[in-house]
Amino acid sequence: MGPTDILGRIDELKRRKNAVILAHNYQLPEIQDAADFTGDSLELSRKAASLEAEMIVFCGVHFMAETAAVLSPGKKVLLPEPAAGCPMANMITARELRMWKEQYPGRKVVCYVNTSAEVKAESDICCTSSNAVAVVNSLVEGEVLFVPDKNLAAYVARETGRRIIAWDGYCYVHHRFRPEDIRAARALHPGAEVWVHPECPLDVIDLADRVLSTGKMVSEARTTKAREVVIGTEKGIIYRLGKENPAVRFFPARDAALCVNMKMTTLDKVLGALEGMVPAVTVPAPIADRARGAIQAMIEIS
């Protein structure tokens, strides 16, 4: 079956089963093209919760499908590639967080959305890369715990002036960016602006013109006056940026900035998920209720 036939079959099954396909900004181009909505993880999960669809096919990684399941408890959530995990999310477990909290009684836990539902359930409030500064500023406590991304925590600490105790986790894609990558990109594209993700190390952030989440990159690209932009995040987003903004040229700050897990989803796997309605991602109700509370606490201050 060729790509055109696969896409036709996917559309047919979507209509018959009242399904919606969501694709993260880092997914393969053909997956983004096949999706009904493309965006960042929380944006997509909130979108899914607002739709009448009975089934969500989440083209991303496991924690994203979990978040969709938490926010859409009455809907069936499918993850086309069950092996697509997030190494950073896997760097902390609920048990580890419980033990860590015992060392710092009374501290609020800020949990990056890139975590499992079980970790969210052990946290006081979630954050995204775009609202992490606002979330930390909303807390009256002088010292907070932040899981799991130490790079994002360092950026937020500097922006807020708050004392943040960070878990020793990181996104391996963003953590590998180095100052020399930014310098080399500027040498190749001397007239370009440089946008980097706040999951990058501080010495990389210091060399950028803008520090933006993936969602903010998408929105800023629509209004930027720059004709060339170097992008310091997983380079899968460049497909969407270029497609939506053909007058701007986008370049990766690092050619090797690829998330292997994000590239595991294929059209064949999306079709297979729709045909068999598996693999489904579920979250036990007690965990989902507590995780939803941490997410809602964030939404209320955003």
Image (cartoon, rainbow, N blue to C red):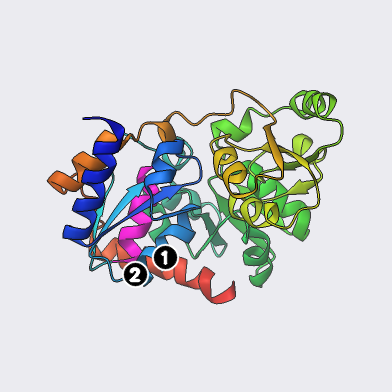
Answer with left or right where residue 255 lies relative to residue 160: left
Answer with left or right where residue 29 lies relative to residue 130: left
- Amino acid type at circle 1 is Lys
Q: Observer-nearest residue: 161 or 252?
A: 252
Magenta residues?
61-72
- Residue 274 position, x and y percent, is 20, 47
Mark 2 lies on residue: 51
Answer with left or right where residue 300 lies relative to residue 8: right
- Residue 266 position, x and y percent, is 33, 34
Q: Pointer 2 and pointer 1: residues touching (CB < 8 Å)?
A: yes
Label 2 – label 1 distance at C-alpha = 7 Å
- Picture residue at 38% right of the left edge, 55% below the top: 36
Q: Quarter of the image holding residue 260? A: top left
Label disc, if present, on residue 47 of the rendered structure: 1
Q: Residue 66 magenta-drawn?
A: yes
Q: How would you rate the neighbour count of disc 1 (Cα within 10 Å): few for under 14, some for 14-19, many for 20 or more?
A: some
- Picture residue at 70% right of the left edge, 55% below the top: 220
- Picture residue at 48% right of the left edge, 49% below the top: 114
Secondary structure that dominates the magenta span: helix
Q: Secondary structure at mark 2?
A: loop
- Amino acid type at circle 2 is Leu
The quarter of the picture where the C terminus appears is bottom right
Q: Say whether residue 82 is visible.
A: no
**Does 241 sit above or below residue 184?**
below
